Image: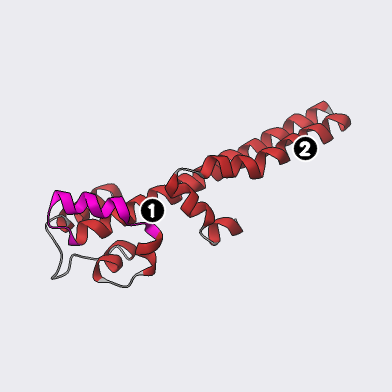
Amino acid sequence: MFLLKDGFLREAGESGAAWPVIAALVLPGIVLAYIGLRRVSTGHAAAAAGALGFVLLASGGVVELAREEGVRLVDEYCAYGAVSDARLDGCKGHVTADEVRSLRTPAAVFAVEEGDCGDGAGPFCAEAVERRESEAD
Protein backbone atom coordinates (compact mmCIF):
# COMPACT_ATOMS: atom_id res chain seq x y z
CA MET A 1 0.00 0.00 0.00
CA PHE A 2 2.96 2.35 0.37
CA LEU A 3 3.07 2.59 -3.41
CA LEU A 4 -0.52 3.85 -3.50
CA LYS A 5 0.22 6.32 -0.70
CA ASP A 6 3.14 7.79 -2.64
CA GLY A 7 0.95 8.18 -5.70
CA PHE A 8 2.81 5.64 -7.83
CA LEU A 9 -0.07 3.24 -8.33
CA ARG A 10 -2.51 6.14 -8.45
CA GLU A 11 -0.62 7.58 -11.41
CA ALA A 12 -0.17 4.11 -12.94
CA GLY A 13 -3.91 3.60 -12.63
CA GLU A 14 -4.65 6.88 -14.36
CA SER A 15 -2.30 6.09 -17.22
CA GLY A 16 -3.54 2.51 -17.66
CA ALA A 17 -0.18 0.98 -16.73
CA ALA A 18 -1.35 -0.46 -13.41
CA TRP A 19 -1.86 -4.10 -14.33
CA PRO A 20 1.74 -4.70 -15.42
CA VAL A 21 2.96 -3.06 -12.23
CA ILE A 22 0.69 -5.18 -10.05
CA ALA A 23 1.56 -8.35 -11.93
CA ALA A 24 5.29 -7.65 -11.57
CA LEU A 25 4.89 -7.14 -7.83
CA VAL A 26 2.43 -9.89 -6.93
CA LEU A 27 2.77 -12.67 -9.51
CA PRO A 28 6.28 -13.79 -8.45
CA GLY A 29 4.98 -14.13 -4.89
CA ILE A 30 2.13 -16.32 -6.06
CA VAL A 31 4.49 -18.56 -8.03
CA LEU A 32 7.01 -18.86 -5.19
CA ALA A 33 4.30 -19.58 -2.64
CA TYR A 34 2.81 -22.23 -4.87
CA ILE A 35 6.17 -23.92 -5.50
CA GLY A 36 7.23 -23.75 -1.85
CA LEU A 37 3.96 -24.98 -0.41
CA ARG A 38 3.51 -27.68 -3.05
CA ARG A 39 6.40 -29.51 -1.45
CA VAL A 40 4.60 -29.40 1.89
CA SER A 41 1.02 -30.11 0.90
CA THR A 42 -0.97 -29.81 -2.28
CA GLY A 43 -4.00 -28.46 -0.36
CA HIS A 44 -1.98 -25.72 1.32
CA ALA A 45 -0.39 -24.66 -1.95
CA ALA A 46 -3.76 -24.26 -3.63
CA ALA A 47 -5.07 -22.25 -0.68
CA ALA A 48 -1.99 -20.00 -0.68
CA ALA A 49 -2.18 -19.48 -4.44
CA GLY A 50 -5.90 -18.68 -4.13
CA ALA A 51 -5.27 -16.17 -1.35
CA LEU A 52 -2.49 -14.47 -3.26
CA GLY A 53 -4.66 -14.44 -6.37
CA PHE A 54 -7.32 -12.66 -4.33
CA VAL A 55 -4.71 -10.08 -3.28
CA LEU A 56 -3.87 -9.54 -6.95
CA LEU A 57 -7.51 -8.97 -7.84
CA ALA A 58 -8.08 -6.71 -4.84
CA SER A 59 -5.02 -4.65 -5.79
CA GLY A 60 -6.45 -4.26 -9.26
CA GLY A 61 -9.70 -3.03 -7.73
CA VAL A 62 -7.85 -0.41 -5.69
CA VAL A 63 -6.02 0.79 -8.78
CA GLU A 64 -9.27 0.93 -10.76
CA LEU A 65 -10.87 3.05 -8.01
CA ALA A 66 -7.87 5.38 -8.08
CA ARG A 67 -8.14 5.63 -11.87
CA GLU A 68 -11.86 6.43 -11.68
CA GLU A 69 -11.23 9.04 -8.99
CA GLY A 70 -8.51 10.62 -11.15
CA VAL A 71 -10.81 10.78 -14.17
CA ARG A 72 -13.54 12.35 -12.01
CA LEU A 73 -11.14 14.99 -10.65
CA VAL A 74 -9.96 16.00 -14.13
CA ASP A 75 -13.51 16.00 -15.52
CA GLU A 76 -14.82 18.25 -12.74
CA TYR A 77 -11.77 20.52 -12.76
CA CYS A 78 -12.10 21.08 -16.49
CA ALA A 79 -15.89 21.44 -16.35
CA TYR A 80 -15.60 24.22 -13.78
CA GLY A 81 -13.97 26.76 -16.08
CA ALA A 82 -14.54 25.54 -19.63
CA VAL A 83 -16.67 27.78 -21.82
CA SER A 84 -16.82 25.55 -24.91
CA ASP A 85 -16.66 21.88 -25.86
CA ALA A 86 -13.27 22.47 -27.49
CA ARG A 87 -11.82 24.00 -24.31
CA LEU A 88 -13.33 21.23 -22.20
CA ASP A 89 -11.76 18.54 -24.40
CA GLY A 90 -8.44 20.37 -24.53
CA CYS A 91 -8.30 20.65 -20.77
CA LYS A 92 -9.10 16.95 -20.30
CA GLY A 93 -6.37 16.12 -22.77
CA HIS A 94 -3.52 17.79 -20.91
CA VAL A 95 -4.45 18.05 -17.21
CA THR A 96 -3.63 15.21 -14.80
CA ALA A 97 -5.30 14.33 -11.51
CA ASP A 98 -2.06 14.99 -9.62
CA GLU A 99 -1.99 18.52 -11.05
CA VAL A 100 -5.57 19.07 -9.87
CA ARG A 101 -4.70 17.78 -6.39
CA SER A 102 -1.71 20.13 -6.16
CA LEU A 103 -3.62 23.30 -7.06
CA ARG A 104 -5.69 25.58 -4.81
CA THR A 105 -7.63 27.36 -7.57
CA PRO A 106 -11.43 27.57 -7.38
CA ALA A 107 -11.67 24.86 -10.05
CA ALA A 108 -9.34 22.53 -8.13
CA VAL A 109 -11.18 23.13 -4.86
CA PHE A 110 -14.45 22.41 -6.68
CA ALA A 111 -13.11 19.06 -7.93
CA VAL A 112 -11.12 17.90 -4.91
CA GLU A 113 -13.51 19.01 -2.18
CA GLU A 114 -16.62 18.42 -4.27
CA GLY A 115 -17.65 22.02 -3.78
CA ASP A 116 -20.20 24.21 -5.53
CA CYS A 117 -19.89 26.26 -8.68
CA GLY A 118 -18.51 29.71 -7.94
CA ASP A 119 -18.83 33.07 -9.67
CA GLY A 120 -16.19 32.25 -12.28
CA ALA A 121 -17.62 28.87 -13.20
CA GLY A 122 -18.48 28.11 -16.81
CA PRO A 123 -21.62 26.52 -18.25
CA PHE A 124 -20.33 22.95 -17.80
CA CYS A 125 -20.00 23.30 -14.03
CA ALA A 126 -23.71 22.83 -13.34
CA GLU A 127 -23.67 19.65 -15.43
CA ALA A 128 -20.76 18.34 -13.35
CA VAL A 129 -22.70 19.00 -10.13
CA GLU A 130 -25.77 17.23 -11.54
CA ARG A 131 -23.65 14.24 -12.58
CA ARG A 132 -22.01 14.13 -9.14
CA GLU A 133 -25.40 14.22 -7.40
CA SER A 134 -26.89 11.53 -9.65
CA GLU A 135 -23.90 9.24 -9.01
CA ALA A 136 -24.30 9.75 -5.26
CA ASP A 137 -27.89 8.48 -5.34
Residue 57, located in which quarter of the rendered image? Answer: top right
Which residue is label 2 attached to? 33
Q: Secondary structure at mark 2?
A: helix
Above or below, 50 against 114 in this view is above
- Looking at the rendering, the stretch of residues picked out in magenta corresponds to 81-97
Above or below, 118 against 29 in this view is below
Crowd band around label 1 with a 10 angstrom C-alpha radius: few (<14), some (14–19), many (20+): many
What residue lies at 74% left-to-right and 29% top-to-bottom?
46
Which residue is label 1 attached to? 70
Crowd band around label 2 with a 10 angstrom C-alpha radius: few (<14), some (14–19), many (20+): some
What residue lies at 35% left-to-right and 50% top-to-bottom?
71
Residue type for callout 1: Gly
Q: Is residue 16 left or right of residue 3?
A: left
Residue type for callout 2: Ala
- Quarter holding the N terminus is bottom right
Measured as percent of width and height from the top left, residue 3 is found at: 58, 56
> Are circles 1 and 2 on residues that touch, CB within 8 Å?
no
Measured as percent of width and height from the top left, residue 88 is found at: 20, 52
The prevailing secondary structure element of the residues shown in magenta is helix
What residue lies at 44% left-to-right and 47% top-to-bottom?
15
Above or below, 7 against 57 in this view is below
Front label number (1 vs 2): 1
Q: Is residue 95 magenta?
A: yes
Label 1 vs label 2: CA separation? 34 Å
Which of 128/14 is in front? Answer: 14
